Image (spheres, rainbow, N blue to C red):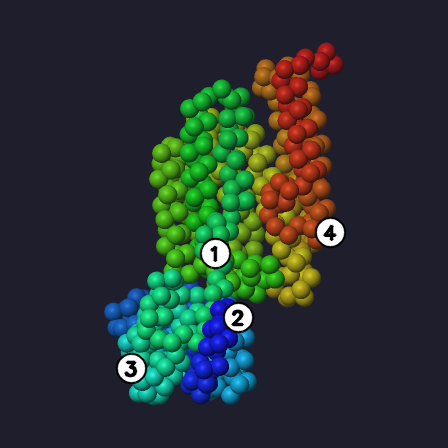
Amino acid sequence: MELPLLSDQTALEAATSRLPLCVDLDGTLIRSDLLMEGVLAAPLNIHVLLGLVALTFSGRAAFKHRVAKAAPLDPALLPYNETLLAWLQGQKMAGRSLVLVTAADSAAARSVADYLGLFDEVIASDGINNLKGKAKARVLAERFGVGRFTYVGDSRADLPVWQIAGSGVIVNAPHVVASSARRLVTVEAEIEDRDSLATALVQEMRPYQWIKNILVFVPIFTAHATSDLSGWIRAAVLFVGFCATASGIYFLNDLMDLTADRRHPRKCRRPFARGAVPLHLGAILAGMLLLTGMVLGAEAGAFAVLLLYAIISVSYSMGLKEKPLVDVFLLAALYTIRLFGGGEATGHHLSLWLLGFSSFLFLDLALVKRVGEMMQCAARNEQRMTRRGYRPDDINLIQMFGCCAAFASSLVLALFVQSEARMQIYASPGLLWGIVPLMLFWQCRIWLATVRGNMHDDPIVYAVCDWVSWAVGVTAFAVLAIAKSVTFSLF
């Protein structure tokens, strides 16, 4: 936060101390936009959607009023600018009058004002008049008089208001807007505490999750086609396509889960939840990422697979994640689809053995993820998971399902090892039995970490950071290499 120089501060304070502080809401008091918040929180039923579409032609103020009515927001969960709030509280204690002046609907604005308990008055859009830009300037001039108030804002739309204000406070405004505001009004204070947008966008894309997309390369290994250069290239293109699509889905998922994420002790720090990325920008980038993924999927020859992945992922985010058991089966399917995509792109299609093993393995990992979340909810004494269909007393049953899936995957792997077809590929096929206890040990260890409360994220991400998982993986690959190239008379 930047303040005037000490030599000028006394004169400035004397000139402005009695001026009421008129504070903008969207992008200033909160690091978000109430209209976008309401649109994202509105229930997804046909009547609400048709009503909102119709109101887009009836004027912005009417549209805001309908959104506020359809999706009332909890003001306690909004991402407030804490630096500005602290400054406003100091001004309030010094005796200044605070007025919330916003283009947001009056119902939403009053709920925020009531929650904060700072403001003496609320001036907002009323369903007929949209209080933005010149309209806001006109209302404030009529209410206080030109030059008789201090305006706190952040955007280009606030320039007409600063032009008639007695002084101004600039909050996280773009450089061009801030420069224009300084030419129009005496600046009382500037607050600049935004996160880096580029850093926040990279965080939202979750590149650490892209490790899952390495599954597209698995069919090359299972087909023993590691010398297939064209297959590697197509798989690499598909890998990037899956990464772009997955990141687009993460954008959509976090936009849909704003309220749930803000209630979560860890997810509340996600970029959209804390207001580090504008919601409208997130919606645009989600579409661009999904389109990029589809184009790359078509280039790799697996467009249908990637499209199916996107449809299932969006359906999951839009509501299927709230259906118990359906959610974990869909998560397992999304892993398996990556394998299918790799097979389509490279031309090395999945065997039934790989399909059976991977289906049980991925179901096991999906159940691990859900049990980990359920245990965190139980630790917080929550009676129900937000946007999930499980209750705390379901946890033992879900654990049982997961353990059964783990042993089933190992059983399929054991039957695969016994397959006569494998005898013709490996010099010492009997050595492959060493992989079975390794995989079972790893899955049992994942469950042990989960029930001990150490599974705070996706199990794949956990495994990447776990040295024991790396040791198991390296040992398994060593067994494969030795079984293929070295002949042991014992086998």
Q: CA distance from mark 3 to mark 4?
A: 61 Å
Name the residue located 36 percent from the left edge and 34 percent from the top edge: 299
Could you tell which of marks 4 and 2 lies nearer the N-terminus? 2
What secondary structure is found at the residue carrying circle 4? loop
Identify the image quadrant of residue 307.
top left
Residue 107 visible to an observer of this rendering: no
Q: CA distance from mark 1 to mark 3?
A: 34 Å
Q: Disc 2 marks which amino acid? A: Thr
Q: Which residue is mark 1?
A: 196
Q: Nearer the viewer, residue 410 or 266?
A: 266
- As measured in the structure, the alpha-carbon distance from the residue carrying label 4 to the one carrying label 2 is 39 Å
Task: Kindly indicate the quadrant of the structure image that contains residue 176.
Answer: bottom left
Per the rendering, the mark at residue 452 is 4
User: Looking at the picture, does residue 371 appear above or below residue 489?
Assistant: below
Task: Measure how far apart labels 2 and 1 are at the Cα level.
Answer: 16 Å
Q: Residue furthest left?
A: 57
State the residue at coordinates (47%, 73%): 4
